[in-house]
Amino acid sequence: MRDELAGFTIGVTADRRRDELAALLQRRGARVVLAPALRIVPLADDTDLREATRACLDRPPDILMANTGIGMRGWLEAAEGWGLAEPLRSVLAEAYVVARGPKARGAIRAAGLHDEWSPDSESCEEVVDHLRRRGVAGQVIAMQLHGERQPECTAALEEAGATVIEVPVYRWAPPTDPAPLHRLIDLVAGRLVDAVTFTSAPAAEALLRAAGDRTETVLEALRGDVLASCVGAVTAEPLVRRGVPVSAPTRARLGALVRTIVDELPRRTVTIKAAGHLLTLRGHAAVVDGELRPLAPAPMAVLRALAASPGKVLSRTALLRTLPRGADEHAVEMAVARLRVGLNAPRVVQTVVKRGYRLRVD
């Protein structure tokens, strides 16, 4: 497979299926930073799920909203453990079943049930609109939740006259080890990653929440240099609401997400001519005359600053501001030296005596 993403660094905030997504990106040459923003955990106390199941058996639902594959499988497995799997399947078999997406549809069919309809957008809002148009007054709706309550959807259906039984199968929890997430936040804030992937809306919310007083800094990075790549429109909503432009495939699949990144990231690169060489700047590397040259963060930061104003002389003080805190002017000289070695094109960066450095574009 071609290395379309060689030289780019991509953050992965998923927990479940993170290894699969990372492998897809790495096969295309990307450097991956794994930083789960949330983890899915079963309900520690299944009292609420058991009560919701009993409610469905006592008052069989007219409509089943199946939101996720893992949630539907978990519900039926829990019912199996209580000896209620067959009674539950029997009542659900009589319901009008809406599957929010293909994974939910697969779980429904694997259970021997029949789904009637799915939304094109895979959004709960489209499901609610469909049910309200169909008419839900006086009907019972079993809503399988996906991690968190959806009070807006529940309220809209109740306002239309339905009785909603919320079925909580799993919940979101903070990552067991928060250090990787905080490291990713540091990288985003410092614009040291090229993209961050999100596979659920709660994960996007969790990353911003974990950023704390740096939330606005992270958002500014996502609005500019760092690509926010979401698996679908539902996942993107918390970021779109905050003014972040997102990249998302039309179909909410991991493979489609990766293809979107492969299309988008190379288009965002900077290409310049300097000292007879063609340079393309990627996240942690430069492509010099078609050859990938990985660079450490400090030399890469200097190159980015010089490339932003080709031919313009930047002082050591100006370049110092691009380096990590605590660096001094000697660190600038070291970064420039390492940059020249890393590019293997020493004439690209010119020293202007007593003034600073510039890219030689003449």
Image: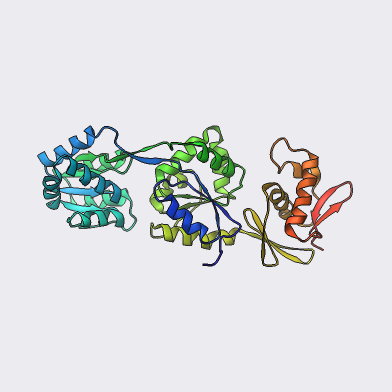
Colour basis: rainbow
Q: Position of residue 95 (x, y in %)?
A: 14, 51
Residue 315 occupies quadrant: top right
Left or right, residue 85 beside residue 66: left
Q: How many marks?
A: 0
Residue drawn where x is 29% and y is 36% of the image:
43
Q: Position of residue 86 (x, y in %)?
A: 12, 48
Q: Is residue 76 above or below residue 27?
A: above
User: Residue 310 versus residue 79: which sits nearer the camera?
Assistant: 79
Q: Position of residue 195 (x, y in %)?
A: 54, 51
Q: Position of residue 111 (x, y in %)?
A: 19, 54
Residue placed furthest toward the right: 353
User: Residue 42 versus residue 56: which sits nearer the camera?
Assistant: 42
Left or right, residue 126 beside residue 317: left
Residue drawn where x is 55% and y is 40% of the image:
183
Q: Is residue 142 above or below residue 110?
A: above
Residue 149 occupies quadrant: top left
The answer to whether any part of residue 249 appears in the image is no
Left or right, residue 16 beside residue 243: left
The answer to whether any part of residue 251 appears in the image is yes
User: Residue 143 versus residue 72: which sits nearer the camera?
Assistant: 72
Residue drawn where x is 89% and y is 49% of the image:
353
**Image quadrant in which the C terminus is located:** bottom right
